[in-house]
C-alpha cells in the first residue's frame, strides 16, 4: 500500500481533481466499455472510426475519456494503482507496462491474443513486443510505435547549399546538425526545433538520447547518480547552446506539438523528434505544401550508434476492469491489421498508425507507396533501438528516453524543470545539473539500500 500511496501522491500533483480510489459513477452498464485515451491525433481517429466497431459488435457501447498526456498519465496511474474499476481499457506505454505487470496491476493479454483468430502477436515489431512484456507475456499491445529521427526541409537545405551524404548507412553527428542549424537560421526561421518544455515526456525525450550518445547516463551500475558528470554536462550544454544559438524562440515552453506547428509552417528548417510525427506532417490535408519536401535521417550520434528512442502508446486492461472481455474485443480491433487498413481507406493512408506492425510496411501497398521517404527508416529505427543497453557505459536500468523505474515520473519532471530554466536563461546549465544531481542521489540511494 505504501508504494500505491506514493504513486497516487506523485500523480496527484499532476491532476488534483482525480480521486485515488478510482471511484465515481460513470454510468457504466454490463455491455459498456470505458476507454481512457491520450488525446493525440491517432487516438482521435480511432474515436471517429469507433462506430465501425459498434456496428460489428451490436450491444457493445463504447465510452471514451480523452485526456491530455499529463492528465491521462495521472488519472490512469491513480485508478490502476489503487485497484479502481474506472477504466476497462487504459492507454499506457512501455514505461508503465512492465512495472505495472510486475506489480500485478494489469491483466495478461497473451492468452486473449492467442485465442483471437488472425490477431498475430508475432506481427508486432519485436522491440516493441519485448518492451510491453513481463516474464514472456504481453500485458499491453501497441497501438502505434515510434523511435526518433531528424526531419529536415530538403528545399531549404538545397537553397543553403547543404548536401547530405547519400550513403544509406549514413548517420549524422550532432556536431554536423548544429553546424547546419547555424547556417540555416534566419531572422524569421529557426535552424532547428528542439523541445524545451518541462516534463519527463517532453524535453527529456529528445535530450536523453543526446545524453546517451554523448556517453552520459543517469546512474552508474551501482546506482550512483551521474547527472553532474562531465559527459552529462557536456550533452546538456550542447543541447541548450544549440537552442540558444539556432533554435526556436520561446523554447522553454516548446514541446512536441509546438515544434510540429513550427516545422509544418516553415518556421524551422529541421526538427529532431518522434518518427510518429509523419502522421501529421505527411498528411496532404494538413500540410499540402510540405508533401515531397521533407527529408529524414537517423537520430544524430556522437559516441553511441543507434541513439533513437523507443516508445509506444499501447492498450492494456487494468486488473479490476468491469468488462475485460469487452475491453479485449475493442483492443484487438483497434490494434489489428484490419484497423490499419480501415484507417487508410476511410481517413487517408498517411494517417495509418505507424510503427506497431511489420505488416503495415510489407502488406499494405498503398501505405508503402506513400511512405517511401520515411517508412523504411521508421521501421529500421524502431527495430534497432536498444532500451536494454541505452548507454555507452553499463547502467542498472532500461529505457532510452526515460529511466524505467517508478520514481522517474517525479525525478524526470524535477530535472526537466531545472533544464528548462537554463534554456530560459534563469540559471546556468551547471547550476541546473548540480541541483538535478541532488534529486537523483535521493533516488539512487533508495536502490542502493534495497
Image (cartoon, rainbow, N blue to C red):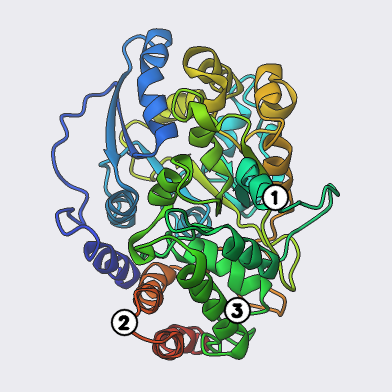
Looking at the image, is mark 2 or mark 3 earlier in the sequence? 3
Looking at the image, is mark 2 or mark 1 earlier in the sequence? 1
Q: Residues within 10 Å of mark 1 (few under 14, many from 20)?
A: many
Question: Residue at position x 68%, y 61% from top?
Answer: 300
**Viewer-side label of 1, 3:** 1
Relative image position of residue 152 (x, y in whole percent): 61, 48
User: Front-most of 166 and 126?
Assistant: 166
Question: Residue at position x 63%, y 41% from top?
Answer: 155
Residue 9 sits in quarter: bottom left
| Quadrant where the N terminus is found in the figure | bottom left
The answer to whether residue 393 is above or below residue 279 is below
Give the secondary structure at mark 3: loop
Looking at the image, is mark 1 or mark 3 earlier in the sequence? 3
Residue 217, disc: 3
The Cα–Cα distance between marks 1 and 3, rounded to whole angstroms, is 24 Å
Residue 426, disc: 2
Report if residue 235 is visible in the image. Answer: yes
Residue 297, disc: 1
Relative image position of residue 192 (x, y in whole percent): 53, 58
Amino acid at each position: 500500500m505504501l508504494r500505491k500511496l506514493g504513486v497516487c501522491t506523485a500523480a496527484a500533483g499532476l491532476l488534483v481533481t482525480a480521486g485515488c480510489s478510482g471511484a465515481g459513477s460513470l454510468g457504466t452498464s454490463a455491455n459498456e466499455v470505458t476507454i481512457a485515451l491520450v488525446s493525440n491525433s491517432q487516438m482521435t481517429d480511432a474515436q471517429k472510426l469507433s462506430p465501425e466497431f459498434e456496428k460489428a459488435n451490436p450491444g457493445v457501447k463504447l465510452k471514451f475519456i480523452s485526456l491530455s498526456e499529463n492528465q491521462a498519465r495521472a488519472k490512469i496511474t491513480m485508478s490502476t494503482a489503487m485497484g479502481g474499476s474506472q477504466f476497462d481499457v487504459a492507454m499506457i506505454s512501455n514505461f508503465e507496462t512492465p512495472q505495472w505487470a510486475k506489480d500485478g496491476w494489469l491483466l495478461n493479454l497473451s492468452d486473449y491474443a492467442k485465442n483471437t483468430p488472425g490477431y498475430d502477436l508475432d506481427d508486432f515489431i519485436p522491440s516493441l513486443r519485448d518492451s510491453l512484456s513481463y516474464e514472456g507475456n504481453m500485458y499491453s499491445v501497441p497501438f502505434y510505435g515510434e523511435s526518433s529521427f531528424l526531419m529536415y526541409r530538403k528545399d531549404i537545405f538545397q537553397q543553403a547549399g547543404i548536401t547530405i551524404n547519400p550513403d544509406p548507412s549514413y548517420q549524422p553527428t550532432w556536431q554536423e546538425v548544429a553546424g547546419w542549424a547555424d547556417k540555416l537560421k534566419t531572422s524569421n526561421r529557426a535552424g532547428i526545433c528542439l523541445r524545451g518544455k518541462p516534463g519527463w515526456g517532453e524535453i527529456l525525450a529528445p535530450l536523453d538520447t543526446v545524453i546517451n550518445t554523448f556517453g552520459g547516463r543517469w546512474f552508474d551500475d551501482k546506482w550512483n547518480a551521474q547527472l553532474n558528470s562531465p559527459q552529462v554536462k557536456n550533452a546538456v550544454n550542447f543541447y541548450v547552446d544549440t537552442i540558444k544559438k539556432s533554435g526556436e524562440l520561446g523554447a522553454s515552453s516548446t514541446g512536441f506539438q509546438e515544434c510540429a506547428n513550427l516545422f509544418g509552417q516553415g518556421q524551422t528548417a529541421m526538427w529532431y523528434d518522434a518518427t510518429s510525427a509523419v502522421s501529421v506532417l505527411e498528411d496532404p490535408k494538413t500540410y499540402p505544401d510540405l508533401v515531397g519536401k521533407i527529408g529524414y535521417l537517423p537520430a544524430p550520434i556522437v559516441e553511441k550508434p543507434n541513439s533513437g528512442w523507443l516508445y509506444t502508446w499501447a492498450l492494456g486492461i487494468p486488473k479490476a476492469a468491469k468488462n475485460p472481455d469487452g475491453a479485449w474485443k475493442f483492443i484487438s480491433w483497434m490494434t489489428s491489421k484490419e484497423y490499419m487498413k480501415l484507417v487508410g481507406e476511410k481517413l487517408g493512408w498517411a494517417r495509418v498508425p505507424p510503427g506497431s506492425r511489420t505488416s503495415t510496411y510489407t502488406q499494405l501497398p498503398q501505405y508503402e507507396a506513400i511512405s517511401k521517404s520515411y517508412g523504411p527508416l521508421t521501421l529500421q529505427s524502431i527495430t534497432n533501438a536498444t532500451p536494454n543497453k541505452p548507454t555507452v557505459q553499463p547502467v542498472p536500468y532500461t529505457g532510452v528516453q526515460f529511466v524505467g523505474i517508478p520514481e522517474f515520473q517525479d525525478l524526470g519532471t524535477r530535472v526537466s524543470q531545472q533544464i528548462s530554466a537554463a534554456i530560459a536563461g534563469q540559471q546556468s546549465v551547471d547550476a541546473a545539473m548540480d541541483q538535478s544531481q541532488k534529486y537523483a542521489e535521493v533516488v539512487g540511494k533508495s536502490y542502493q539500500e534495497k
